[in-house]
Amino acid sequence: MNNVLIINAHHEYPFSRGQLNASLVERAKAILEQNEYTVRTIKTDASWNIEQELENHIWADAIILQTPVNWMSVPWTFKKYMDEVYTAGMGGALCKGDGRTAEEPKKNYGAGGSLTGKKYMLSLTFNAPAEAFDEPDEYLFAGKSVDDLLFPMHMNFRFFGMEALQTFACYDVMKNADIENDFIHFEAHLKKLFI
């Protein structure tokens, strides 16, 4: 993996300016570039060009999606990005249809991806504490993991034929933040996967 696209999916709200997600993007970019990766970044809250974003996905060996988890999913600006960029990529840039054939119309749905051999990583920021996940007695997630919660994001990348790298998460960032330790863990996570 030599080329990495980092997508900053943060959407700015009055209570959340996106400083943590922006800092994680900058740290990832610096760490990767220090280790001879070529890095491109995009912020979905800013302007972007569909054709350029398709080219970015084709160019990248790996994609890092840096996003807060808002209402159990990604911010609407990344959803808009997906709706426009990923739909435009259905003609072959990202996938060749949905993988089914006329001969087998009921099989292999989602297996038409054009980005096979490429990888992706989810890097998430949560208001929820880590203890809210993977614990059957916890009320909201009832034993589900972070990856269970973000299953639709995993399926979007898998639809293009991409392979998941281990997810990273910062927890409890609004009420009990431990940002310096989050940065230390993030750097170790990136080095384990990329260096």
Image: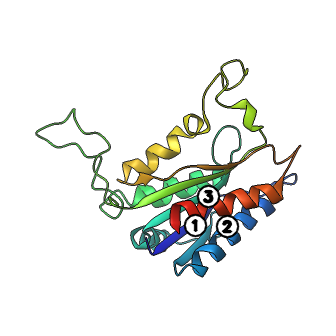
Residue at x-position 71% and y-position 24%? 140
Residue closer to the observer: 76 or 148: 148
Q: Position of residue 175 (x, y in %)?
A: 89, 43
Say which amino acid is labelled 1.
Ile
Q: Position of residue 56 (x, y in %)?
A: 46, 72
Residue tagged 1: 6
Up/down of 107 relative to 2, above or below? above
Up/down of 8 relative to 125, above or below? below
For the residues bearing labels 1 and 2, Cβ distance under 8 angstroms: yes
Secondary structure beneath disc 2?
helix
The residues bearing labels 1 and 2 have C-alpha atoms spaced at a distance of 7 Å
Residue at x-position 47% and y-position 74%? 3
Q: Is residue 114 left or right of residue 145?
A: left
Residue closer to the observer: 76 or 55: 55
Residue tagged 3: 189
Quarter where residue 59 is shown: bottom left
Say which amino acid is labelled 3.
His
Secondary structure beneath disc 1?
strand
Residue closer to the observer: 52 or 67: 67
* Disc 3 versus disc 2: nearer the observer: 3
Closer to the N terminus: mark 1 or mark 3? 1
Closer to the N terminus: mark 1 or mark 2? 1
Quadrant of the frame with the N terminus: bottom left
Quarter where residue 185 is shown: bottom right
The residues bearing labels 1 and 3 have C-alpha atoms spaced at a distance of 15 Å
Q: Is residue 150 visible?
A: yes
Residue at x-position 87% and y-position 54%? 14
Residue tagged 2: 25
Q: Is residue 58 left or right of residue 68?
A: left
